[in-house]
Amino acid sequence: MSPRVVAIDGPAASGKSTTARRVADVLGFEHLNSGLLYRAVAWAALEGGWLPESGDAGTDAVDRALPDLDLELVPGADGYEVRVDGREPGSALRDPAVTRLASLLSARAPVRRRVNERVQEEARRRDVVCDGRDIGTVVFPDADLKVFLDADEDERARRRLLERGETLAPEAVAAEADRLRERDEADASRSLSPLRPADDAVRLDTTELSPRAVVDRILLEARRRGIRPTHV
C-alpha cells in the first residue's frame, strides 16, 4: 500500500500547522511543514552569503547553490527536523531575518521546485500530514484528503499575537490584521502557486471552532476516505 497524504492548506495564522501536527499524532503519520524547508533555504542563503546585504531575493546565487544543497528531513517526536548540509539550524529557523527572507525566496520558481521535490520525496517513504499554502493544489494534487482552513482576519490576528505573547489591545489586533491582509493578498495574487483552495478540498472556517473541533472534523473526513490510524 502506497504511503498516504493528508494535505492542509490555508493563510497565515489559520491554525494549519497546529492542526496538522495534531492530526498526524492521532493518525500515526509524520507531520511535515513545507515552510520548514523554505526557512532552511533562507537560513542557508544567509549563512552562505548568497545574497547581498540588501537581501535581494532576485540574485542568481541562490539558484546556483540550490542543486547542491542537501536538505535532510529527520522525523522526530514533534515532527521533522531539518539538517542543511549536515548542520542543524535549530531555533535559528525562527529568526526574523530568516522569516523575511523565506517569504521572499518562496516566490522564486527554482526554490519552490527544490522544496516541492524534497517534500514529495519524503511522502514516497512514509504517511504524512503536510501543511503549507499550495499542498493540495500543486505539491500533492492527488492527496488522499485535502483540507483548506481559514478564519476571519481579526481572529487570525489575535491568534498570531497570542502565539508571540503580545497584547490583545484593539490597536494591536487591527495592526496585525492589516499585516495578515497584505500577506493574504500577496499570496493569492502571485503568479507562481497562488494561495487558493483545491477544487476538491474540504473547507473549514475555524473562526468559531476550538482546535479540538477542527481536528475532529478532519479525522471524520479521513475516516470517510478510509484513512485510519496506523497504530490501531
Image (spheres, rainbow, N blue to C red):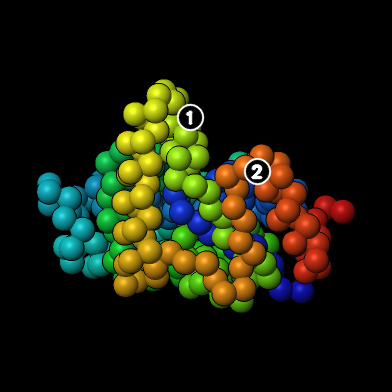
Residue drawn at (25%, 67%) of the image? 63
Q: Position of residue 4 (x, y in %)?
A: 69, 67
Judged left or right of residue 53, residue 181 is right
- Would residue 142 be found to the left or right of residue 9 on screen? right
Name the image quarter holding the N terminus. bottom right
Q: Which image quadrant: the C terminus?
A: bottom right
The nearer-to-camera label among 1 and 2 is: 2
The answer to whether one can see residue 10 in this image is: yes
Q: Is residue 189 above or below residue 153?
A: below
- The residue at the point 75 percent across, 62 percent down is 222
Give the amino acid at mark 2: Leu
Q: Quick check: 227 left or right of 102? A: right
Residue 134's x, y, as percent?
47, 65
Task: Kindly give the residue lying farthest to the right in the view shown.
Answer: 232
**Percent from the top left, x then y, of residue 103?**
32, 53
Relative side of 15 to 154, left or right: right
Q: CA distance from mark 1 to mark 2?
A: 17 Å
Q: Nearer the viewer, residue 6 or 111?
A: 6
Instruction: Determine which of the numbered discs, if any, sits on residue 162 in the image.
Output: 1
Q: Secondary structure at mark 2?
A: loop
Residue 198 occupies quadrant:
bottom right
One can see residue 67 in this view: no
Residue that numbered label 2 is attached to: 209
Q: Nearer the viewer, residue 95 or 15?
A: 15
| Circle 1: element type | helix
Residue drawn at 67 percent across, 67 percent down? 145
What percent of the width, then of the height, locates residue 133?
46, 60
